[in-house]
Amino acid sequence: MQLAKIISKIAQQTASINPTLAARLTLYASGLHPANINQEQIDQRLSALEKGPRAADILTKRVLNLMDTVNRQKEQILTLEERASVPRVDRQLGILDKEAIVQEIEQACQSRKPFALALVDIDDFRKVNATLGHKGGDLILELVANVLATNFGTEEDFVGRYGGEEFLILVRRRIDNFSQRLDISRQEIETLTHGLIPGLKKCEPVLTYRQTNHVDEPPQAVTVSIGCGTFRTAPESASSAIVKVDKASFLAKKLGKNRIENRN
């Protein structure tokens, strides 16, 4: 079952017991396009996140459009595939695969122009799989990929799956507000999953998995740890740049998870 269908079903199921959440999910139709985000809008959105209910309205309104956004990106990437006859997309998530995102980073290094890079790692993903099953885990992966692709999916920004529950984000323009944009994504992932997991537990095939395996309760929300860096002087290679943000991501986990650490 696709993520969009799951969300719609959750909205229907929660209508009688939590009409506010159901309305937030159902009424989502529009939102700020990430390509047009400027510093003022970032400040406004961060301010909204601190105000509670109003933030939830903004964030949950965005959920129902996530799949549409990524589906469009899938079509664009698949078109590129057909032209180049080279696999470049992770077919599960609709974002660049490991080889493609590393290639883009390598080109950024060779260009000798400044760029920003981040490694996003889902916290405690084994627990997510253990308590929601692999189908539930796949849906969480889709949601995280969709949030990142929505916030960074432009011609000059690239999002790719580095492996398992790890993602790489490459930004070659507008790098000065990179950390703020990452933090918006981090908070959105936590807020959206906090609203979706209770309903997800009641949906097939997650419900059957939980009843059959008698598993523990899933986390209340899914969070991510992010390591990032701005490279104003080009590193020697993509691998050396990735190592630096990977170390920063590891530090973020070591310091408590659900946070961003800058390798600078």
Image: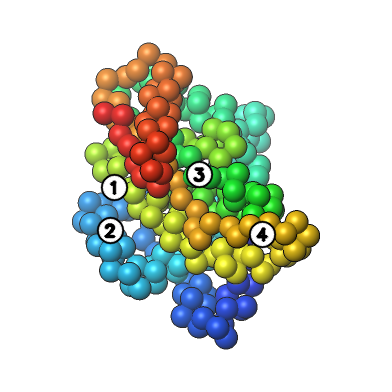
At mark 2, the secondary structure is helix
| Residue contact between numbered discs 3 and 4, judged by CB atoms under 8 Å | no
- Along the line of sight, which residue is nearer the eye, 261 or 46? 261
Location of residue 2 with respect to 51 vertically, above or below: above
Q: Mark 2 = which residue? A: 46
N-terminal label among 2 and 1: 2
Q: Are marks 2 and 1 in contact (CB under 8 Å)?
A: yes
Rendered location of residue 94, percent (x, y): 59, 45
Of the image marks 1 and 3, the number of the one nearer the N terminus? 3
- Under mark 2, the amino acid is Leu
* Extreme residue toward the top, this view: 236
Q: Which residue is mark 3?
A: 122
Measured in 3D between alpha carbons, the distance from the residue under mark 3 to the one under mark 2, in whole angstroms, is 21 Å
Which residue was labeled with disc 4? 2
Residue position marked by numbered label 1 in the rendering: 180
| Residue at 42% in and 38% down | 253
Amino acid identity at mark 4: Gln
As measured in the structure, the alpha-carbon distance from the residue carrying label 1 to the one carrying label 3 is 19 Å
